[in-house]
């Protein structure tokens, strides 16, 4: 049996658009989005324990270890499968917290994927996705591991053709609580859904929007400031600034670029503005991922 798995990647995601199309009777919002995995990622180490303890070696500030999604994921898998082994989890964070990039959900999914091998639980992808949904609506995406069109609360996934892309991602110095955004009376909740047939990434980028963005920008001024700086940077680099938008429930923003050179130009212009105003946040140049790095590995026998 394998004793340890090191540096397992937990990639971030972008919502190329995010529409709120309705609300269920139980209060959950119905969404329409396209998820794209990117190469900004956290890293997770898993070390086998012969007892049943689940130990998080790197607790996050302000998050009780027992509430951490990685711990909850490990315990859920053990309970579901009857596994009598434990694990030590070490998490190295690179994905900004509270940014709408899915870092916590991705971390949980990577723990599920890694433990499926480490504990030899041998669940199928469909079984692991069903388990992942109990941890949060975004977690199944990272088990699915592909670029996807999503509906429902975000858990009904349809694979889309891979379209390699570059993006510039900006993380304003603020965390946005998702629940507060969805509870806002100003949130649009009746956007007409797209039809998936024939849609492409270009269609998503040019025609889609993020219904949560106006709510976040109104309540969190640093997001508004960072978005304005990103749009100025895109204009200066000769890229259509109207493509810049928020991902997820914020606070992170992104702008697609036609190639690596254009992405680097946007980042350079943003860095120049940041030198005069650190409050607009950090900036990353990222590429899309064709597949989650653990997409097939986690299910190999």
Image: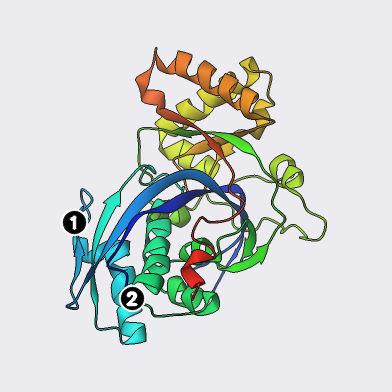
Residue carrying label 2: 119
- Secondary element under disc 1, as helix, strand or loop, is loop
Which residue is farthest bottom? 82
Which residue is farthest front? 1
The earlier-in-sequence mark between 2 and 1 is 1
Residue carrying label 1: 57
Q: CA distance from mark 2 to mark 1?
A: 19 Å
Residue 64 lies, with reference to residue 255, above or below; the image says below
Q: How many labels, in total?
A: 2
Image location of residue 296, percent across then percent down? 54, 65
Label 1 environment density (alpha carbons within 10 Å; few <14, some 14–19, many ≥20): few
Which residue is farthest right? 198
Q: Residue at x 46, y 15 (%)?
A: 273
Q: Using the rendered image of the protein, determine whether residue 211 is visible from the camera's viewpoint.
A: no
Label 2 environment density (alpha carbons within 10 Å; few <14, some 14–19, many ≥20): many
Colour scheme used in the picture?
rainbow
Q: Residue at x 35, y 46 (%)?
A: 97
User: Which quadrant of the structure image shows residue 112?
Assistant: bottom left
Residue 87 lies, with reference to residue 238, above or below; the image says below
Q: Using the rendered image of the protein, determine whether residue 2 is visible from the camera's viewpoint.
A: yes
Q: Nearer the viewer, residue 86 or 160?
A: 86
Q: Quadrant of the N terminus?
A: bottom left
Q: Residue at x 69, y 46 (%)?
A: 208
Q: Residue at x 68, y 18 (%)?
A: 238
Relative to 97, 52 lies left or right? left
């Amino acid at each position: 049996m394998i004793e340890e798995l090191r540096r397992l990647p937990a990639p971030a995601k972008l919502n190329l658009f995010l529409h709120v199309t309705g609300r269920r009777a139980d209060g959950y919002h119905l969404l329409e989005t396209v998820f794209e995995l990117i190469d900004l990622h956290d890293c997770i180490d898993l070390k086998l324990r012969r007892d049943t303890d689940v130990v998080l070696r790197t607790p996050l500030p302000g998050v009780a270890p027992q509430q951490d999604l990685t711990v909850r994921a490990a315990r859920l898998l053990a309970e579901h499968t009857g596994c009598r082994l434990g694990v030590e989890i070490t998490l190295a964070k690179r994905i900004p917290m509270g940014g709408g990039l899915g870092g916590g959900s991705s971390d949980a999914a990577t723990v599920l994927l890694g433990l499926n091998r480490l504990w030899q639980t041998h669940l199928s992808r469909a079984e692991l996705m069903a388990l992942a949904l109990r941890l949060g609506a975004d977690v199944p995406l990272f088990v699915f591991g592909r670029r996807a069109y999503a509906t429902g609360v975000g858990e009904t996934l349809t694979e889309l053709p891979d379209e390699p892309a570059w993006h510039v991602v900006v993380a304003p110095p603020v965390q946005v609580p998702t629940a507060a955004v969805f509870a806002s009376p100003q949130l649009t909740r009746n956007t007409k859904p797209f039809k998936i047939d024939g849609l492409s990434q270009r269609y998503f980028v040019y025609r889609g929007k993020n219904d949560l963005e106006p709510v976040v920008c109104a309540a969190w001024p640093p997001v508004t400031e960072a978005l304005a700086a990103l749009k100025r940077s895109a204009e200066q680099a000769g890229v259509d600034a109207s493509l810049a938008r928020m991902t997820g429930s914020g606070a992170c923003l992104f702008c697609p670029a036609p190639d690596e050179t254009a992405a680097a130009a946007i980042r350079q212009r943003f860095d120049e503005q940041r030198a005069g105003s650190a409050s607009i946040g950090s900036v990353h140049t990222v590429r899309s991922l064709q597949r989650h790095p653990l997409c097939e590995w986690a299910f190999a026998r």
